Amino acid sequence: MGRDARLDALHSRHSELEVLLESETARPMPDSSLIATLKRQKLAIKDEMSRMSRPA
């Protein structure tokens, strides 16, 4: 997978996680452990995108 394709895939997954996070937090009784997991996954993806965007 090329660098641009990987960045696109990461961006898509980051967006998907954002939708899931918004959906979970909108529930009357959100699952705090799921929210924490989704936030950790989003942060890991954001960190990877940041690393990939830096000049080599």
Image (cartoon, rainbow, N blue to C red):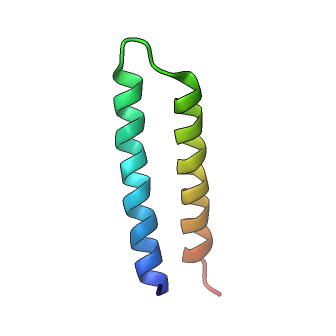
User: Picture coordinates of residue 39 (x, y %)?
Assistant: 55, 40
- Res. 23 image quadrant: top left
Above or below — where is 8 with respect to 29?
A: below
In the shown orientation, is residue 33 left or right of residue 26? right
| Image quadrant where one finds the C terminus | bottom right
Residue in the picture at 34% in, 41% down? 19
Residue 23 as seen in the image, left or right of residue 46: left
| Residue nearest the viewer, comparing 46 with 20 | 20
Image quadrant assignment for residue 40: top right
State how many labels appear.
0
Residue 30 coordinates in the image, percent (x, y): 45, 19
Residue in front for this viewpoint, 23 or 52: 23
Q: Residue furthest top?
A: 28
Q: Is residue 18 above or below residue 3?
A: above
Taking the spot 50% from the left edge, 22% from the top edge, the residue there is: 31
The image shows residue 25 at horizontal and vertical percentages of 41, 24
Q: Give the quarter of the image for residue 7.
A: bottom left
Q: Residue 4's spot in the image, x, y percent?
A: 43, 82
Q: Residue at x 44, y 54 (%)?
A: 14
